[in-house]
Image (cartoon, grey):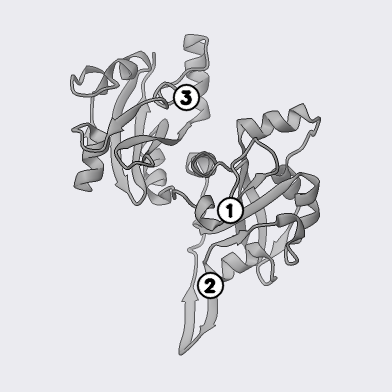
């Protein structure tokens, strides 16, 4: 529990015991945050008994390829895993835990309160955003060079927020993939914003098909009119979850052939703040 003095009183907030991001919900949150923001890495700082440590991380394919090309064998996120931070400090992680407000660091290598500023400089990390999440803090950032986005403000870093509770519910119900659909810049169509496939599902598809394709990878290039009658637009417009029990045989579902090819058993479309979260369950091929 935390007690923060405020004007006219004290703000109390707390996290239930054992209430942390974990499993596929954590992995999806990290990857999809990188997808939507253009970050090269993301990691989850978990708070336990006054100490904060890294409990999960993700490195984008573009960032990984850049590091390998330059001969760097470890990432900034991996190097940060040895750090143990205190919840009572004045660094950005502790500040987010204490205030439950996002922190944006434009120049990480020269941030006076950041204990890892030397690591940031060593690994070419330019800007970092830290946000409060269940049981801790999610940190993600961009680097110098073309392998990540170029942020100019916290708005660039927070273009879309993944709905954590919906992601948890999806994987608890047996989901094997998620896709986040968001409006394009013109506001006329829904486009791919982020996705995640469980490692087990990817292995199964690889063994069965012999390639690296998935229902999500083949959906990335698709767009759907915001004024259309498809499930993405309809869920957003009605603010109601839509479920397609057998997408492979649905004549009105634009991706029915893909659903059949990749053995998708059912698909849910859940409206959320910044778009529509799709999740589905895969069957054996």
Cα–Cα gap, marks 3 and 1: 37 Å
**Residue 58: quarter of image:** top right
Mark 2: few, some, or many residues within 10 Å (few <14, many ≥20)?
Answer: few
From the viewer's side, name the closer residue of 164 and 271.
271
Q: Is residue 150 above or below residue 63?
A: below
Q: Secondary structure at mark 1?
A: loop
Q: Residue at x 52, y 41 (%)?
A: 23
Q: Position of residue 144 (x, y in %)?
A: 70, 43
Does residue 49 appear anywhere in the picture? no
Mark 1: few, some, or many residues within 10 Å (few <14, many ≥20)?
Answer: few
Residue marked by disc 1 = 152
Which of the two labelled residues, at mark 3 and mark 1, occupies the earlier sequence position?
A: 1
Instruction: Single out the mark in the foreground, 3 or 1.
Output: 1
In the rendered image, the quadrant that contains the C terminus is top left
Q: Is residue 14 left or right of residue 42?
A: left
Instruction: Single out the mark in the foreground, 2 or 1.
Output: 1
Q: Do tag 2 and tag 1 residues touch (Cβ < 8 Å)?
A: no
Which of the two labelled residues, at mark 2 and mark 3, occupies the earlier sequence position?
A: 2
Q: Residue at x 49, y 52 (%)?
A: 158
Q: Which mark is residue 201?
A: 3
Cα–Cα gap, marks 2 and 3: 38 Å
Q: Do tag 3 and tag 1 residues touch (Cβ < 8 Å)?
A: no
Which of the two labelled residues, at mark 2 and mark 1, occupies the earlier sequence position?
A: 2
Residue marked by disc 2 = 1
Q: Is residue 197 above or below residue 5?
A: above
């Amino acid at each position: 529990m935390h007690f923060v003095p405020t004007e006219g009183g004290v703000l109390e907030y707390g996290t239930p015991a054992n209430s942390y991001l974990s499993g596929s919900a954590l992995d999806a949150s990290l990857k999809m945050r990188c997808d939507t923001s253009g970050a090269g890495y993301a990691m989850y700082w978990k708070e336990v008994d006054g100490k904060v440590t890294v409990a999960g991380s993700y490195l984008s394919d573009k960032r990984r390829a850049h590091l390998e090309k330059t001969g760097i064998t470890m990432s900034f996120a991996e190097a940060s895993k040895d750090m143990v931070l205190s919840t009572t400090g004045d660094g950005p992680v502790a500040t987010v835990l204490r205030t439950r407000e996002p922190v944006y660091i434009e120049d990480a290598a020269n941030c006076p309160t950041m204990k890892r500023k030397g690591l940031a400089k060593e690994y070419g990390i330019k800007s970092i955003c830290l946000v409060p999440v269940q049981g801790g803090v999610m940190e993600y950032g961009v680097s110098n060079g073309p392998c990540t986005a170029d942020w100019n403000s916290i708005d660039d870093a927070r273009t879309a927020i993944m709905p954590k509770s919906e992601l948890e519910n999806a994987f608890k119900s047996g989901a094997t993939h998620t896709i986040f659909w968001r409006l394009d810049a013109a506001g006329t169509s829904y486009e791919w914003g982020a996705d995640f496939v469980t490692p087990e599902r990817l292995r199964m598809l690889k063994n069965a098909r012999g390639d690296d394709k998935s229902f999500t990878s083949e959906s990335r290039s698709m767009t759907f009119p915001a004024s259309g009658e498809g499930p993405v637009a309809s869920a957003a417009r009605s603010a109601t979850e839509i479920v397609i029990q057998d997408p492979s045989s649905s004549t009105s579902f634009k991706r029915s052939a893909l659903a059949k090819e990749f053995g998708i058993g059912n698909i849910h479309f859940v409206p959320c703040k910044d778009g529509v979260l799709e999740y589905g369950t895969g069957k054996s091929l």
